[in-house]
Every structure is written in C-alpha cells, then in structure tokens.
Amino acid sequence: MLRQEYLPASAVPDTAHLLAQPGVLALVNFGDSCAAMAQPGVIPLGMPSLCDKPWEVIRYGDSIAERGTDEHCQWSLIEDVLCVATWIAPEDCSDIEAATEVAYGRLFRVIQAKGFPYPFRIWNFMPDINNGVGDREEYKKFCVGRQRAFDDYHVAPQEYPAASALGHHTKGAVIYLLAGRNSGVHHENPRQQPAYQYPREYGPTSPSFARATSLALRSREQVFISGTASIIGHNTQGVGDLEQQLTITLDNIKHLLMHVGQADSELSGVRVYLRRPQDLAVARAFFAARLPALVVNFIHADICRSQLLVEVEALASPRL
C-alpha cells in the first residue's frame, strides 16, 4: 500500500539520507518556500504546518526510488507508482491561466514518456487564489488553464482524477501528482454535484477533478479523497461557521466512502487546510472529539471559495 506519514522537523535532519531509504517515494515539505530544490524527491509547497509537522513522507514498496529531472519536472519512481512535481516561477504566476496550461503540459509529457500515463492524485498550490473579481479570480483562471491542458491531452471529464487546489501566502506555485501504469476508478459523491458540471457562476470553466479516485496498489484497494469542503450540491454551506463546515465536510467524506464501498477503511494522510490560523484550537478539538485516533496535519491555506474556512483531504486504506 501507499502510505503518507507526517513527521516533525527533528525527525528529518537529513533529507538525502531519508530519500535513500527503501520505500521512500518523496518528501513533501510544509514551509514558507515554494520552489524546486536541487535534489529530486523533495516537494516544498509554500504553506506551513500549524502543528509542527513540516514533513510528509510518501512511502511505497520496498525498493530505493529512482529519481531524475525532465521537462523542468522532478520525478521519483518506485515499482508501479510515479511521483512528478513541477514549479511555476513567481513571475509566471502573473498569468496563472497560461502558466498552468504549460505546467500541466510538462507533467503530462513526463508521465507519458515514462509509461505512467494515468494520474490518480494531483495537488495544486498557488498564490493569491481568491484575488480578482468575477471571472478574473485567480482560481477561476487556474481552472481555465488546467482545463485547456486536459483538452490538449484528450483527458475526458470521466477521466479526471482526485485533486486538491489551495492558496498559499508566498511566491510561486507547484503542481505535483501520483501516476500509474493503469487507470484508477474515479468517483463522485451523491451529495455533491460533480465539480466539472458546476453552473456558469463558478467560472468560465468548471473545476476539473473527481471527488475521489480508487486504485489497487499491491493488490490493496486504496481511495484517494480529493480536497473536500462544506458543499452540498454545488452550494457552500455553513458560511461563517467553522464547526458547521467541519461537520458537513466530514459527513461528505463519510458518504463518499459509503458510496464507493469503503466505509470501514482507515484514514491516513489527513490534511486539514485552515484559512484562519486562529481556528486551529477549534479544529483540533473537533477532530479529537469525532476521530480521536486520527493523525491530522493542520495546514494554513486559502480555500478555493472565499466563503470556505476549511478543506479536508485524506487517503482511505483497508484495515490490516
């Protein structure tokens, strides 16, 4: 199975040593930098952890990862999972629509060239996601660029994988993904309208992602849950009420897992993105009461809709 584990800074004194260990596919860094490092396999996001867990280790298989750089992308490969990351320079973020199309094109060329043409989980992090009015909002422009790339590479709506898109407060942007040799199964949530069918009010191009993607990795079915928020149908719920938004978000995840037949799965890799750092205590208490055994990383990030205070993503795996 693929695993996502969170570590404090003290546990990662040497990234090179950790990357050389068997089964370490990539290291995700929650901090203030959003720029490629010299060593492939380390992915800085530009958004800090609010609970002293600045590192995520993505583990898979038993081999030492192959790593390299192609098409201005950094990649890591273990067995049948490929991780690829690409960054957008701060000056190019001034036209996030065009830059996103170019960045996705790089990613698609790399995964196709390496024989892993099926992305099953994508993460997108960019600056100023809520800036702009109407169709000129940064997130809406990002969605147009992403859609153009999907169209360029003939990715149909039913093939859109699980994804998250968040805003940070530094410069530059990063997109990274996990891809396989075979296609996963992409799922929608009966409580929510498919994002790619949102009405025109959400922008000239609807968001291009599935609510979840499931995939058998080493013969075990895992469900990669997209960034999930307090949305029913296509409408935001609980405006201004963090606890209500948290309740609806977790209910959405619960209904999604029931829908895909994974209600008894174990959650890991849980990220709770909080718009306001001062909400940490409330959010932490909420999860401690509802899911006391769950390991959660709380991240400071802007959500794609300005009315949303929180977004949650996770990985669901069969219990061992």
Image: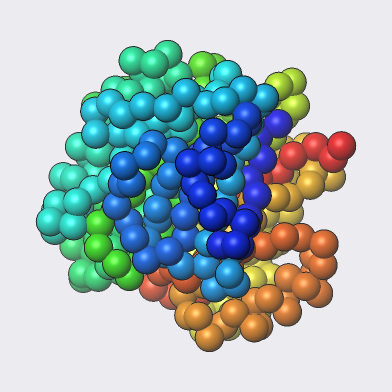
Q: Percent from the top left, x then y, of residue 28?
A: 49, 49
Q: Is residue 183 above or below residue 240?
A: above
Residue 264 visible at all: yes
Judged left or right of residue 31, residue 232 is right
Judged left or right of residue 273, residue 320 is right
* Residue occupying image coordinates x 39% and y 36%: 40
**How many numbered discs?**
0
Colour logic:
rainbow
- Front residue of 15/127: it is 15
Q: Is residue 204 above or below residue 171?
A: above
Q: Percent from the top left, x then y, of residue 61?
A: 66, 26
- In the picture, which quadrant includes the C terminus? top right
- Front residue of 313/201: it is 313
Judged left or right of residue 227, residue 117 is left
Q: Is residue 247 above or below residue 15?
A: below
Residue 190 visible at all: no
Quadrant of the image occupied by residue 208: top left
* Residue occupying image coordinates x 67% and y 62%: 296
* Residue occupying image coordinates x 70% and y 31%: 1
Q: Percent from the top left, x then y, of residue 287?
A: 73, 70
* Residue occupying image coordinates x 56% and y 42%: 18
Judged left or right of residue 271, residue 308 is left
Q: Percent from the top left, x then y, of residue 53?
A: 59, 63
Quadrant of the image occupied by residue 12: bottom right
- Front residue of 22/110: it is 22
